[in-house]
Image (cartoon, rainbow, N blue to C red):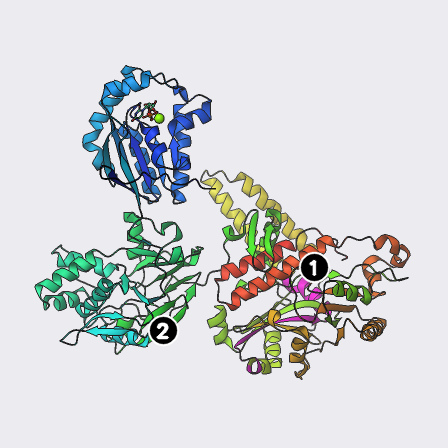
Amino acid sequence: MTPEIPVTPETSDTTEVRVPASGLVVLVGVSGSGKSSFAREHFRPTEIVSSDACRAMVSDDENDQSATPDAFELLNHIVGTRLRRGLLTVVDATNVQSRARAELVSLARRHHALVDAIVLEVPETVAGARNAGRADRDVGMTVVRRQQRDLSRSMKRLRKEGFRRVHVLDAGGAPPRVHIVRERPWNDRREVHGPFDVIGDVHGCLGELRTLLEDLGWTLDLDDAGRAVGATHPQGRLAVFVGDLVDRGPDSPGVVRLVMGMVEQGSALCVSGNHEAKLVRALRGNAVTVSHGLAQSLEQFGREPEQFRADALAFMDGLVAHYVLDDGRLVVAHAGLKEEYHGRTSARVRAFALYGDTSGETDEYGLPVRYPWAQDYRGKAMVVYGHTPVPSAQWLNNTICLDTGAVFGGALTALRYPERQIVSVPAQQQWYEPIRPLGAPSTERQPSVLRLDDVGGNRWLDSTRAGRVKVEEENAAAALEVMSRFAVDPRWLVYLPPTMSPARASSREGYLEHPQEAFDEYAAWGVTSVVCEEKHMGSRAIAVLTRDATVAARRFGIDDGSSGCIHTRTGRPFFADTAPLVESLRDAVAPLFASLDTDWVALDCELLPWSAKALDLITDQYASVGAAARHALPAALAGLDAASGRGLDVEDLRRRTDARHANALAFRGAYAAYVRPTDGLDGVTLAPFQVLAVQGHLLAETHPHPWHLTQFAGLTSDLITPTRHRVVDLTSQREREDAVRWWEELTAAGGEGMVVKPAHLVTGRVQPGLKVRGREYLRIIYGPDYTESLPLLRDRNLTHKRRLALREHGLGLDALAGFVAGEPLWQVHQRVFAVLALESEPVDPRL
Ligand code: UTP
Ligand code: MG
């Protein structure tokens, strides 16, 4: 529990002391000046970091001066950690020496936090007298006098040391009567909840702005000359401008007049763009290079009356660099903002918000190359920004760029928040010739896939449908190996299927698994209707198919001309070239695109026959890995030798690489023995049994299994193998017995068995499916004589397998749900990755 913030009542003789709500407060004063008493009175115990407490923590004695260096190391660590986490921190130490203060100021700067000093001034004699009466101190007069000398010397320069404010309090008599006000930074407007219309870079395009506002339902206020001087929204929406109101376009003063009016009315907020910052300098008469459309603005503002120019200048000069809105859920900054800068205040944060994270390099058009911060963005807050023109506003990791190049002949774009709806109006004309053509590839918004630190280490994943899932480090490492070396292009990997447990052991004479057990289990879980599907003797296959390659590019970010992907239950391709199979399957299921009104489908299938996978895995997967390793590793070794020649210590890495090379050769020897010619895709078929998801819908969750099976019934292609099935009303003994007979016929004819699933998806502890394998098929699994040891086998423990099945099922659905909802791909992949990681948990492979 967080202790209450102590509040000193405000009376006529209290002094108000305003400190940064999430910054650093450095107390300054000689021993006995009352720092600890002051801190106790005005701040929470957890907010106070005291050098005495740190000294005691590292030495058991708060007066042990030999422990001072260690104590301050600890103090700095705690202060840094708290500032990183955005917590108000009060340093209780004498801080009379400039070196000690400099350390704290630089710590605050490193975390983009504001820092204030509170100086407690007391006469030497008073401090001395107080200390004399303290049992916890043996500070003599000499020490106090020395501290007093240091402090006096400091007082003159204190303000120049980087403190935002220096509060000097007279603490000589009674404790100073102050009222502490925790001041939030200007950019912290978390109490404003919108709804918002966030508007992209306007650049003087007044006509487009007026049209856009009207399209969004705003009513413009016009002055006598017909100029827009404000606007209100009947639903009380708030406009937020991402900056760059000015330059290049036909009427920058007109845009400023309107936006300034809206901000004054309280119907808009506006952050500064880099163009405002530069125009402010130019209007003030500072020397700036007149480029990038500044000339137009200077000429247009030059024609305005003096008073308007002064007002506009004050308005633009006062613009904040970014806003944190809606309880921290929305951040607006002109050039975007990385998470650690949200709500922070420093020159660096402001520069990032205005100009982006420039590296100093320029591209082939002479424009600055910017660090792709959005690609790495992992924050919970939505970041809305502009600055770099893009052909259309696209989501990337919960960020969106609204600069769609209105002034370059593109469009002026707004985002309605929280609706996440995009509204655009086309430019009336090209007002300014772009240096880089609109739509030329920019480095900033590459589709983002999983990053190593999204998945590495022990990690807890909060999953809507599977609860809190722990992914162990070793399992994560195994999954990473699969993902990085064997998986299909990860952008296709939006789902992996769960494992499936067998029904509990049957006590029926001669049987280990039997349908009645599955029926009884589901009935006990409250399920009344199940579907029995034949279990194909093949390999699980997930097919993600798009109407055509343009959909693949738009929705999946795949632009290699492919229009789909078929992968195994661990995300691997079945064949070296899956394209022909993808094409045929897409043609085969083409009617679904129309009937389900979608551009893409994700299907759960079985690929038949089983041998198709095994043989091709050897020839294509293993062979390519072997070949790659045998080419890459000698090159790596050569590189390491070169590095070693330059005196770098790479011995250990070289030894490991050498061993991997030897393994690669052995690996090749092993699989080469199995390589036989195959006849490609001839004879391969697919048995789809569920439409996992389509555009906008997670059908796996919303539609019952029988519905799914009927979707495939009408498909006539030779590529499609139907899945025989029957729906069983569990309350009907007759239907149950019919189903048992059906299972007996299937298995007698060589079938593997069947899968029993609840007709409607049920969550909680209900298994998503139970397999019931045939008596003879189980001989392959448990050995020819397994029927002799049934009593022993019936004891097999299903708990772990079932826990895995439930978690993997939930995570898989979460992944797909995220993809359907347009969540950042890395979030989808975190869940897919977790399924893969859980798959490497040790579990009896015969289950
Ligand atoms: P503090 O323990 O608050 O002083 O007060 P300090 O500045 O933190 O001292 P150091 O640097 O840790 O040594 C010292 C004594 O003075 C009394 C306190 O009750 C305590 O015994 N005191 C403090 C007053 O009598 N009046 C005051 O206004 C403040
Ligand atoms: Mg103290």
> Tag 1, which secondary structure?
helix
Q: Is mark 1 within 8 Å of ligand 2?
A: no
In the displayed image of the protein, which residue is found farthest to the left? 306
Residue 715 x %, y % = 65, 83
Quadrant where ligand 1 appears: top left
Residue type, label 2: Val
The residue carrying pointer 1 sits among few (fewer than 14), some (14 to 19) or many (20 or more) residues within 10 Å by Cα, namely: some
Q: Residue at x 24, y 18 (%)?
A: 125
The numbered disc on residue 672 is 1
- Left or right: residue 137 versus residue 799 is left
Magenta residues (range): 594-621
Question: Of tags 1 and 2, which is closer to the observer?
Answer: 2
- Check if residue 67 falls in the magenta segment: no
Q: Which residue is mark 2?
A: 423
- Check if residue 597 falls in the magenta segment: yes
Q: Residue at x 37, y 61 (%)?
A: 193
- Left or right: residue 726 versus residue 497 is right
Residue 711 x %, y % = 64, 79
